[in-house]
Image (tube, grey):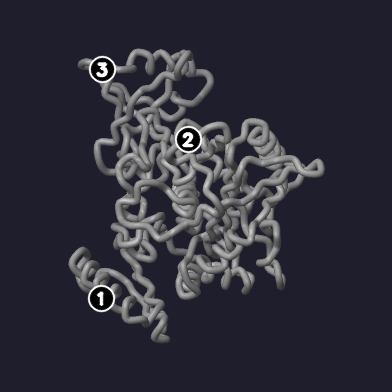
């Protein structure tokens, strides 16, 4: 969740170069003049963002189909060149598991939108043989471990994609007290508005938990659910699990908080067995009152006894802190809370569908170049082998002593975080 801002842009056309301020780009009094500038620049000018990021920061001018509206978009795959608070910033795929997908699974388009390839598509077809990526699975479409070079995005990968691009895996002291379910809903939907799953805009099929029963977010959830019922489209639902009480994990409906406008989510025995075996760690966090996020994909909703309901065919869970920062263990949760308490700026890179990519548990981002932070949380032989591989990688990449680690599994005291932060 970033406070994004518009920076000046520089437009070079022929021998003339002009810089245009944020006010000129956005104020109503300049709208006609700014449109004229973009029309003149379309397809001919060199446009660069003047934010403080490194790199060329090239932008392109686009016009909407059947419209005379023009807008700027970053060049595909140049998001990391921009400053983190710039509207054209995009996450570096190599800093998390996002970079492990095969080409075409996550594709930045020329107009600034993103196209993703989901493992199970959003359109439910019943009148012909299932097509690749659109088949209705028999039983739950289980989220399995994947290999490097994953050729499609699972439901857990989609949750990580939304969370990362919404900036909810990052923290700075300025975010204190500014995160709640309504804000999370807003930022996830902002990402979904520019994301296409095949030819379908994700926002059309995405329902997100919301705190108010009579608010605009709730009404939008219900409208989209009814539309999906009429058009036989699958839904994707993202919401916190409801506060745990004994036996709730065996409920025949998915127990979510912020359910306003969302159909009753029916959970089969197969799906229930899947989440109890695949997500034991996250369920353990839920059982102890730790916040836990669920993403569920459903079949097209139907009306039963006058109410909308939808059959869940797959789901995934994600453990988060009270600041909505994802974590993979109690040790990580402790470090995330300590970083917040000490008013540090950091990021939690998410794994997406990668299994073997090497990246840290956290990036500390207030000491110039990001500093890797590792939390060693297990003692199994396989984990110890992986640990030595990661130590060798960080020593070679950053130099011994230039990255931070804590052996939580050994009961070591938490070392001081790197200081002299900027």
Task: Work out whether mark 2 precedes mark 3 in sequence or the reverse, and give the earlier one.
Answer: 3
- The residue shown at (41%, 13%) is 36
Q: Nearer the viewer, residue 64 or 82?
A: 64
Q: Is residue 310 left or right of residue 329?
A: right
> Residue 196 vs residue 363: left or right?
right
Q: Nearer the viewer, mark 1 or mark 3?
A: 1
Q: Secondary structure at mark 2?
A: loop
Residue beneath the point at 44% across and 59% down: 144
What is the number of the mark on residue 13? 3
At which x and y percent is residue 55?
A: 25, 40
**Tag 3: Cα neighbours inside 10 Å, few (<14), some, or many (≥20)?**
few
Locate residue 96, reporting x and y percent: 35, 56
- What distance separates the C-alpha of mark 1 from that of mark 3? 54 Å
- The residue wearing badge 2 is 194
Estimate how packed mark 1 is, as few (under 14), some (14 to 19) or many (20 or more) residues with alpha carbons within 10 Å.
few
Give the labeled residue for mark 1: 388
Q: CA distance from mark 2 to mark 3?
A: 29 Å
Task: Please tell me whether mark 1 sits on a helix, a strand or a loop.
Answer: helix
| Residue 114 sits in quarter | top left
Name the residue: 25% across, 69% down: 402
Q: Is residue 19 left or right of residue 244?
A: left
Q: Going 38% across and 18% down the picture, which residue do you hit?
A: 38
Res 371 quadrant in image = bottom left
């Amino acid at each position: 969740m970033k406070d994004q801002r518009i920076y000046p842009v520089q437009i070079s056309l022929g021998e003339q170069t002009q810089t245009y301020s944020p006010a000129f780009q956005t104020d109503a009094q300049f709208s006609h003049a700014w449109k004229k500038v973009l029309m003149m620049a379309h397809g001919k000018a060199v446009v660069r963002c003047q934010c403080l990021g490194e790199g060329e920061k090239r932008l392109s001018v686009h016009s909407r189909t059947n419209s005379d509206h023009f807008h700027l978009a970053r060049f595909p795959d140049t998001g990391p060149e921009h400053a983190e608070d710039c509207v054209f910033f995009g996450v570096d795929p190599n800093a998390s598991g996002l970079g492990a997908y095969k080409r075409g699974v996550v594709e930045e388009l020329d107009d600034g939108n993103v196209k993703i390839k989901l493992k199970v598509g959003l359109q439910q077809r019943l009148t012909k043989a299932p097509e690749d990526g659109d088949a209705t699975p028999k039983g739950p479409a289980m989220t399995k471990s994947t290999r490097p070079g994953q050729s499609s995005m699972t439901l857990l990968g989609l949750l990580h994609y939304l969370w990362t691009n919404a900036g909810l895996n990052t923290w700075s002291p300025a975010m204190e007290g500014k995160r709640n379910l309504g804000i999370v809903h807003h930022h996830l939907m902002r990402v979904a508005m520019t994301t296409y799953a095949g030819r379908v805009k994700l926002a059309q099929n995405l329902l997100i938990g919301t705190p108010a029963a009579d608010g605009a977010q709730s009404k939008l959830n219900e409208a989209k659910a009814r539309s999906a019922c009429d058009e036989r489209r699958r839904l994707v639902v993202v919401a916190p699990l409801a506060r745990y009480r004994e036996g709730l994990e065996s409920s025949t409906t998915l127990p979510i908080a912020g359910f306003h406008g969302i159909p009753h989510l029916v959970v089969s025995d197969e799906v229930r067995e899947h989440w109890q075996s695949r997500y034991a760690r996250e369920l353990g966090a839920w059982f102890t009152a730790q916040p836990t996020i669920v993403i569920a994909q459903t079949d097209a909703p139907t009306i039963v006894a006058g109410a909308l309901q939808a059959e869940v065919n797959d789901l995934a869970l994600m453990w988060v802190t009270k600041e909505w920062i994802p974590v993979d263990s109690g040790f990580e949760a402790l470090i995330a809370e300590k970083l917040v308490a000490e008013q540090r700026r950091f990021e939690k890179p998410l794994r997406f569908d990668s299994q073997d990519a090497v990246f840290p548990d956290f990036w500390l981002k207030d000491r110039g170049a990001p500093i890797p932070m590792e939390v060693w949380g297990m003692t199994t032989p396989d984990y110890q082998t992986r640990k030595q591989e990661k130590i060798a990688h960080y020593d070679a990449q950053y130099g011994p002593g230039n990255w931070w680690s804590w052996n939580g599994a050994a009961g070591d005291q938490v070392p001081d975080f790197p200081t002299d932060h900027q």
